[in-house]
Image (spheres, rainbow, N blue to C red):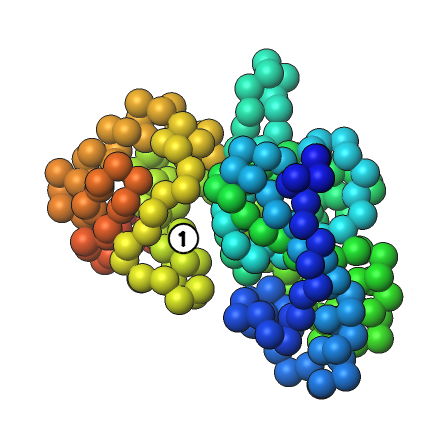
Amino acid sequence: MSDALRATIKVACSNCNLRELCMPMGLLPQELERLDNLVATRRKIKRGATLFRTGEAFGSLFAVRTGFFKTCVTSEDGRDQVTGFQMAGEIIGLDGIVNDRHTCDAVALEDAEVCVMPFERLGELSREVGALQHHLHRVMSREIVREHGVMLLLGTMHAEERLAAFLLNLVQRLHARGFSGSELVLRMTRQEIGSYLGLKLETVSRTFSRFADQGLIDVRHRHVRILDVDALKALLPQPGVA
C-alpha cells in the first residue's frame, strides 16, 4: 500500500462515538487511557484498495471507523467469493489469528478509515483488563454465529429468503449506528450481494424487483427503503418449522 493511502493520526477511543460498538463499556479511566495508547494510529483506505490480502502476515486487528468493506476469497476457478460485509464499529482481521496469515482480502467499498490495533499488544492488555478480554471473546463468538448464519442462508434458504434476511440484517446493523431503521444505501453492487448470498446476478435483480412489485421495498438504484418489515420477516423460515 502506498504512503498516499496511509495516514498516521493520534486517536483516542475515549472520544470516539463508535466506542460502544467496537470496544467494551464500563472501563475505568486508567484502563481507557491504556486503550487509547494501544490504538495509536488510523489508516485511510481509498475505495477499491485493500486493507490486507490473502497470505499477508497478520499483525493487527482493525476497527472500522468510517466506510464499508467486503471480505472475499478467490475460488479455484479464479472468481472472487464475497464472505462478508463490514461497516463502522465492526472489527476485521480476525481471520489471521489462527495461522498468523490472513485468509481473505479486505477491500474498501468506499473511502474508509480504520483504527489499527496491534494484536500482540492487544493480547497483553486484555490479560490485564478483564472487560477487554471478555469483549474480544464476544467479537470472536459473533463471527462464529455469523458464519453459521451464512451457512444456513446458503444451505437451506430460497432466493427470496436469502435477500430478505440480508436486507433485514443490514438495516438492523445500520440502525444500531444511529441510521434509519427502514432506509439504507447499498455500498455493495448487486453482483457482490449475489456472490455473498450464493445467487446469480439475474436472480438478485429479479428478487429486488419482485419485492418492489409486492410493495415490500422501494428501490432507487442503491437507495432502498423497506416499506413492510413484517412482510419481509414473514419470508424467513420460522423456528421449529421444517
Q: In this image, 10 relative to 236: left or right?
A: right
Which residue is drawn at the image coordinates 36% and 43% (left, top)? 186
Q: Residues within 10 Å of mark 1 (few under 14, many from 20)?
A: few
Q: The residue under label 1 is which amino acid type?
A: Asn
Q: In this image, 37 relative to 87: left or right?
A: right
Q: 72 or 228: nearer the eye?
A: 72
Q: How many marks?
A: 1
Q: Is residue 35 above or below residue 100?
A: below
Q: Is residue 185 above or below residue 118?
A: above
Residue closest to the far top: 77
What percent of the width, then of the height, locates residue 139? 64, 60
* Quarter that holds the N terminus: top right
Quadrant of the image occupied by residue 28:
bottom right
Q: Is residue 109 visible?
A: yes
Q: Is residue 62 visible?
A: no
Which residue is drawn at the image coordinates 33% and 34% (left, top)? 159
Quadrant of the image occupied by residue 53:
top right
What percent of the width, then of the height, locates residue 128? 84, 75
Which residue is drawn at the image coordinates 70% and 35% (left, top)? 2
Residue under pointer 1: 169
Q: In this image, 197 relative to 57: left or right?
A: left
Q: 153 or 14: nearer the eye?
A: 14
Q: 88 or 6: nearer the eye?
A: 6
Q: Is residue 163 above or below residue 32?
A: above
Which residue is drawn at the image coordinates 36% and 24% (left, top)? 201
